[in-house]
Structures are given as structure tokens and as C-alpha cells.
Amino acid sequence: MKRISRKFITSKKIPIFLLGLLITFFVQIPASGAENLLLNKDGNWSTEGANGKVYVYGSLTESACSLSMSSAYQAVSLGNIETADFRSPGDKGIPVPINFILTDCTDTSSRILNNRSGNQTWDSVQPGVKIKFLASTDEFSPILAKVEGAKGIGLQLSDTQGEYLHFGEYNNPQLIISNQEEILTYYVTPVRTTNELQPGVFFSTIAFSLSYD
């Protein structure tokens, strides 16, 4: 998994930037094995200068799905919202959907732990996935992402069942139908915080991490 960070501001609109986290394959070279191979010098051919051999080792692992690049980099506009709709702490605006498109999902067994309940989601052929969002949070309401610019507003994430997502924690795992495009949908909602309300343009940078097990 890898994290990518960006920020974006547009006038008169209230954008949120989603940061894409992709799947990364890591190459591992055992230290002792690499040293032994590099010390085995069969070279020194009859040419000018020194000669030798370099042995490169790695491993190729199977990924359950690929994340569409259109999902990895997103700018989501909340539009123009009115201060009259946010008179009291806890007042909410209209939820705006965020879609993550998974492609090339292959048949593979999955066993994913639900970090909240301790239960496991398991299937012999369907891949499973869970997502975690990362952001600076409001000092008084850690369930809200902090914004830059306007004051008195935070951002709340939820799933399609309306369950709030906690930043820094993986959500409930879900199974994916393989060999077809899969769309994961979440919602971002502006919420009034306990801070004094000051109108203006605001933005927030949110990262996400997909995990396949």
C-alpha cells in the first residue's frame, strides 16, 4: 500500500481532496543470501577494468484487485453551503458520495479480520477488502476530519448503511465479486463543530488505505 498527498482549492466551491493509496509490491532480498551471492566473484573477464555479476532476487505476489486511477485521485466538491443550515453543533449538510472503483478482481480465498468485532469475513473464492481513512481530526470531535479555511465545520465519513467511519481504523470488511468492476461507495458530510462558525472557502486532505487479506 502506498500513500499519495495533494491539496486543492477552488473559489466559491468547497472541495475535499481524497488521497489515493494504491497496492504496492515489495521486493525483499535476504541480507545473508544477497551478500553471499555478491561475494561469489566468478567474473574478472579478460577486459580492462574490474568485472563481476549482480544477482537480483524478488518475489511476485498476487493482488486481489486493482484500484482505478480515477479513484486514486479525486476532488470532491461539497458545493456552496449556507451558514443558516449550521446554527448549532451537530447540524449536518447534504452527504456527498465518494466512489472507489476496483477492477481486475481475481478469484482468491480471503480471510479478513473485523478490527472492531474481532470476527472474520471468509470466502474460498471471493476476495475481501476493507478500507481505512486517515486525516487530521477536530480537536473536540475526533470522528470529524479537520478543515483548513472556514471555521466551525468538520467532515464526517460514513458507509452506505449510514455507519460512521472512524479515522485511523479499518471499516467492516466486505467481499467483492470477482471478474467484474466493483464500486465501493462512501459519503462525506459537512458537520457543525463546537467552534465559532466563520464562513469562507475550506478544504481538507484525506488519505485512504485499502487492505486485502
Image: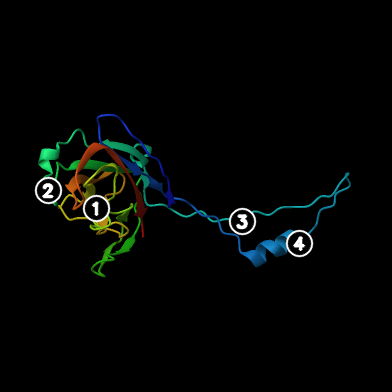
The disc labelled 1 sits on which kind of residue? Leu
Residue at 24% x, 58% y: name it.
Answer: 140
* Of the two numbered discs 1 and 3 in the rendering, the one whose residue sits closer to the viewer: 1
The circle on residue 144 is 1
Alpha-carbon span between mark 4 and mark 3: 15 Å
**Residues under numbered marks 1 and 4 in contact, where contact means CB atoms less than 8 Å apart:** no
The circle on residue 91 is 2
The disc labelled 4 sits on which kind of residue? Leu
Alpha-carbon span between mark 1 and mark 4: 55 Å
Most extreme residue toward the bottom is: 118
Alpha-carbon span between mark 1 and mark 2: 13 Å
Q: How many marks?
A: 4
- Mark 3, Cα crowd under 10 Å, few <14 / some 14-19 / many 20+, is few
Residue at 25% x, 69% y: name it.
Answer: 119
Residue at 33% x, 34% y: name it.
Answer: 9
Locate residue 34, reporting x and y percent.
Answer: 67, 61
* Of the two numbered discs 2 and 4 in the rendering, the one whose residue sits closer to the viewer: 2
- Where disc 1 sits, the SS reads loop
Q: How is the image coloured?
A: rainbow
- Where disc 3 sits, the SS reads loop
- Asked whether 159 or 7 is in front, the reply is 7
Which residue does the numbered mark 3 point to in the structure image?
A: 57
